[in-house]
Image (tube, rainbow, N blue to C red):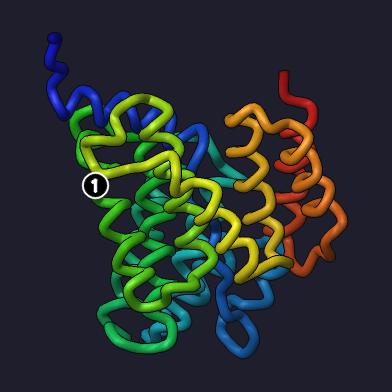
């Protein structure tokens, strides 16, 4: 039996995690928070610049979301994307420091998970070696605080799918049997959250359930757009239908 070094396997698993997971974009409060209007309108850089200066858990959470959205939606693949994602991680941690046990704690943990997951695309294989474990810890910590956290459920389901698809689920206790039940719980908790429908569709396409996946895409496209991020997610949904 050939033994593959754990770091190599996990670094390889990250490639599929990048393609199939990355972390569901959590909703954030924006009304009454500096940067909120800019974020809602899609000026993520301005939103970050305003929010990062305000030392409250809610403002730092908004700064984290804005920085990640800037990296994912506007400058993805560019030399500045990783800088934005590092800022997002820092702001999420600051939110957690300011409110370690409050109503925004679970959302801040998911903000950190999303930024870390996206940042993995830009890091070395060595730096990525333990990413799957770090994400698992963040997902589980979120679900301990909020068992029905829709973003954590959908993201963790995709994590289970990605690792078992590669055949390395045993390294972390990932199980294919958990994928669809967790996805369904996540969608039930937030049925009108567009990005969750898109993530669900991505996994369903991966499982070969094309008809069901297309139904989820159609639902995502029919839901009302509440902010710029929703519009970007609907564009991502259309891309799923046109993918080869």
Spot the residue most to the front. Answer: 177
Rendered location of residue 196, percent (x, y): 63, 56
Looking at the picture, how far across and down is residue 99, in whole percent? Answer: 32, 86
Work out which quarter of the rendered image holds the C terminus and state it: top right
Residue 236 lies, in percent from the top left, at 71, 42
- How many numbered discs sit on the rendered protein? 1
Disc 1 target residue: 133
Secondary element at image label 1? helix
Q: Vertically, is 216 above or below 93?
A: above
- Between residue 25 and residue 148, name the one nearer to us: 148
| Front position in the image: 44 or 5 | 5
The N terminus lies in quadrant: top left
Residue 205: name its quadrant: top right
Please identify the quarter of the rendering in which residue 140 is found: bottom left
Residue ID at (27%, 43%): 131
**Closer to the camera in the image, 193 or 97:** 193
Q: Residue at x 43, y 82 (%)?
A: 104
Q: Image point 73% across, 67% down: which residue?
A: 192
Considering only vertical position in the picture, is 72 above or below 182?
Answer: above
- With 14 as the anchor, is 26 left or right in this view? right
> In the displayed structure, does residue 4 sit left or right of residue 244?
left
> Residue shown at 58%/70% (left/top)?
27
Q: Quick one: label 1, few (<14), some, or many (20+) residues within 10 Å?
A: few
């Amino acid at each position: 039996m050939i033994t593959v070094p754990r770091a190599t396997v996990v670094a390889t698993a990250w490639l599929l995690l990048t393609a199939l997971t990355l972390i569901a974009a959590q909703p954030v409060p924006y009304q009454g928070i500096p940067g909120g209007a800019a974020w809602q309108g899609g000026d993520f850089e301005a939103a970050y610049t305003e929010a990062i200066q305000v030392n409250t858990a809610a403002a730092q959470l908004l700064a984290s979301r804005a920085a990640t959205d800037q990296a994912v939606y506007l400058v993805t693949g560019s030399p500045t994307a990783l800088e934005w994602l590092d800022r997002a991680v820092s702001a999420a941690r600051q939110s957690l420091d300011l409110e370690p046990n409050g109503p925004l704690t679970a959302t801040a943990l998911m903000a950190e998970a999303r930024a870390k997951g996206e940042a993995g695309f830009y890091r070395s294989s060595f730096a990525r070696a333990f990413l799957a474990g770090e994400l698992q810890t963040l997902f589980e910590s979120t679900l301990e605080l909020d068992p029905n956290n829709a973003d954590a459920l959908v993201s963790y389901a995709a994590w289970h799918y990605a690792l078992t698809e590669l055949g390395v689920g045993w390294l972390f206790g990932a199980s294919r049997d958990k994928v669809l039940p967790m996805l369904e719980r996540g969608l039930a908790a937030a049925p009108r959250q567009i990005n969750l429908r898109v993530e669900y569709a991505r996994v369903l396409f991966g499982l070969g359930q094309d008809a069901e996946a297309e139904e989820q895409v159609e639902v995502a496209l029919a839901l009302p757009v509440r902010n710029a991020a929703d519009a970007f997610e609907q564009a991502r949904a259309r891309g799923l239908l046109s993918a080869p």
